[in-house]
Image (cartoon, helix red, strand yellow):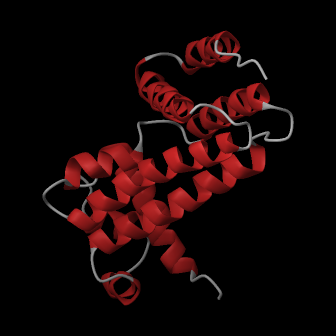
Amino acid sequence: MKKSPKREAILNTAEKLFYKYGFHATGVKSILDQAGVAPMTMYYHFQSKEDVIKEILIRREKEYFQSLESKINKENGINQYVESLIKEHLNWIETDGFNGCLFLRAKQEYESVNEEISALSKEHKKTLLNKIENDLQLFRASESFGMQLFIILEGLTSMAQILELEEVKKTSKDLAISIQVSE
């Protein structure tokens, strides 16, 4: 199926604006003005701003997991897996011009307002944890190690908002070395 350029313009523009200003602070008019599309065009593709948000979260999750899957190293043992997982997560943060986790922002802004958006955000985090736990089964790692790695990734996400990214990267390398697992 061919992607509509105007639909993509709406999604790309909305994602940038939501990421920069938040969901509630970004109005449909701003999205339409910056995307250069008419209201009819948006409502042809989406029923509401919330549908745009859901589509962005779904698309973003797919891109994140494709990025992880293409870059993490499952072939050379658990330590290489851990290092590559942390490195790729930080690369994702860096590439994105980081301004916090869009999923956590969506959960915070839509908790008790739109449960579908809130649920997408929670499911994303659960999917990441499940992916890590499933990957670690290859190495017969302890059950708790998956949660530990998940917490490390979430901590890196948080720290990248308040510290220089290079400092977070350096510390993450030291952390990966300090948690080397004997194979």
Q: Quadrant of the N terminus?
A: bottom right
Side of 125 where 164 appears, left or right? right
Q: Establish if 142 lies above or below 101.
A: above
Q: Establish if 170 lies above or below 128.
A: above
Q: Establish if 56 lies above or below 95.
A: below
**Quadrant in the rendering for residue 174:** top right
**Quadrant in the rendering for residue 95:** top right
Percent across and percent down for residue 89 are 61, 36
Towards the viewer: 39 or 143? 143
Side of 125 where 61 appears, left or right? right
Residue at the extreme left of the image, as rendered: 112
Q: Quadrant of the C terminus?
A: top right
Name the residue located 75 percent from the left edge and 25 percent from the top edge.
Answer: 79
Percent across and percent down for residue 152 are 51, 26
**Quadrant in the rendering for residue 4:** bottom right
Name the residue located 59 percent from the left edge and 43 percent from the top edge.
Answer: 132
Percent across and percent down for residue 142 are 59, 31
Q: How many marks?
A: 0
Name the residue located 51 percent from the left edge and 70 percent from the top edge.
Answer: 9
Residue at the extreme right of the image, as rendered: 76
Side of 126 where 91 appears, left or right? right
Towards the viewer: 124 or 95? 124
Towards the viewer: 24 or 146? 146
Q: Establish if 155 lies above or below 71.
A: above
Name the residue located 78 percent from the left edge and 29 percent from the top edge.
Answer: 80
